[in-house]
Amino acid sequence: MADTISGGRILIADDHPLIREGLGLAARAVVPGVAVDTAGSIGEARDVLSRHGKYRLILLDFVLPDARGFSGFLQLQHEAGRTPIALISSNENPALVESARALGAAGFLYKTRPFDDLARDIRRIVDGQVCFPAMDGSAGGTGDLRERIATLSGAQLRVLIALSDGRLNKQIAADLDVSEATVKAHLTAIFRKLDVGNRAQALLAVQPLLGDVAAARAS
């Protein structure tokens, strides 16, 4: 394997300080001179991204206080552009792994893995490879859904995530500081891009990605 290019920045988003510390140690062990930034929520991660911009890798906990399903991943993916994002979790559900792969994640790392294995996987992703556990199964229609969600603008994605939380148009407008007319316009565009006719159908369509994944709460 060629030597890993030194330096740059890695962002670790996890709400457990000890996990952040351990992943930071693993990253520094295999990427010489790397600067490690940390966040405990999607909101904090977005703030850090806006300050520093370019990252070599984002390590993202699948379950964070302000994320639901893959909603946090989709937000960071939209804002981070081509920066690779690897999900981390103690949940070993094959459906989560395959959905992450279909959505364009660079990897899915188990928190339960030994330190040396995590460090090796981090190096592989920084070197431009993908890193997923070997398993059977598939993500079903998730790949097609990923393509449709990728067509949404940042504003439309935020409205969709708010919609998945059960908020009404008036609440969404207040939260996003836009008019209700703007929310309705975004919803019309979302329905068209997802090929659905109403709010209920949109929620059903994105349930595999934005819905609660109860089993993952153990991560």
Image: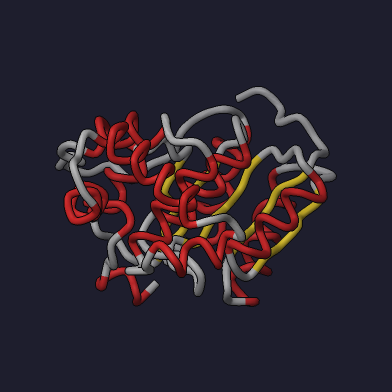
Of the pair 97 and 175, the residue shown nearer to us: 175
Of the pair 11 and 70, the residue shown nearer to us: 70
Q: In the image as oriented, which residue stretches furthest toward the top?
A: 2
Residue 40, picture quadrant: bottom right
Q: In this view, does 188 lie above or below 114?
A: above
27 with respect to 212 (left or right)? right
Q: Is residue 81 above or below residue 49?
A: above
35 with respect to 149 (left or right)? right
Quadrant including the C terminus: bottom left
x%, y% of residue 104? 42, 35
105 with respect to 202 (left or right)? right
Q: Is residue 51 above or below residue 164?
A: above
Quadrant including the N terminus: top right
Q: Which residue is drawn at 34% across and 40% down?
A: 188
Of the pair 134 and 210, the residue shown nearer to us: 210
**Protein image colouring:** secondary structure
Of the pair 156 and 61, the residue shown nearer to us: 156
x%, y% of residue 183? 45, 51
x%, y% of residue 51? 82, 50
Residue 131, picture quadrant: top left
Q: Residue at x 68, y 69 (%)?
A: 21
